[in-house]
Amino acid sequence: MKTNHPSASGGRGHAVARALAVLVLLGAAFVGEPGHADPGDFQAMPGLWKIVTRVFEHGKEGPPQVAWHCVDEGPDPWPEFAQLPVPGYTQCERADPHRSSTALSWTLQCQGLTDAARGRVKFDSAEHYTAGISIKGQDVVQVEGRRYAACTSPKD
């Protein structure tokens, strides 16, 4: 897996900006339902985050995949943190989101997957979180995110 580093140049900034815009639009539909915690209660800090993802295949942990991600102060930060893939499935639909000021959980129905996948994000501080996807109670993805610094420009 390719590792993105904050010093990478070229079109990375534009690609990240486009990806974040898509995530915000998807997230607005996902977390904009009534009855959830106020986004203003959420205390994750904006800035440069190091995201370490581990995929499990047949119960075995794969190598860590590292990505650097600049998170801004949007009206609702959840879309920045709740975009977790289900390995082997590209067409998944979120349902049943449950949210508090420091945690989010949801289910995923994926085309070709007979059981629902379950996603979760949990912040233990404004600068650290863990997340994951499980199927039948077994982790298939584990993520850890840690904030390292402020973003220095819109192209970070």
Image (cartoon, grey):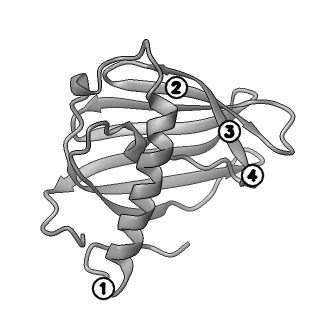
Q: CA distance from mark 3 to mark 4?
A: 11 Å
Specify whether 96 is left or right of 47: right
Q: Quadrant of residue 19?
A: bottom left
Q: Are marks 3 and 4 in contact (CB under 8 Å)?
A: no
Q: Position of residue 7 (x, y in %)?
A: 25, 79
Query: Residue 83, relative to residue 28: is it above or below?
Result: below
> To which residue does mark 2 refer?
105
Q: CA distance from mark 2 to mark 4?
A: 19 Å
Q: Are marks 2 and 4 in contact (CB under 8 Å)?
A: no
Residue at image position (83%, 40%) is: 113
Q: CA distance from mark 1 to mark 2?
A: 35 Å
Q: Label 3 sits on what residue type?
A: Glu
Residue at image position (55%, 53%) is: 54
Which label lies toward us, 3 or 4?
Answer: 3
Query: Residue 124, relative to residue 111: is it above or below?
Result: above
Residue at image position (32%, 39%) is: 77
Q: Position of residue 122 (x, y in %)?
A: 40, 29
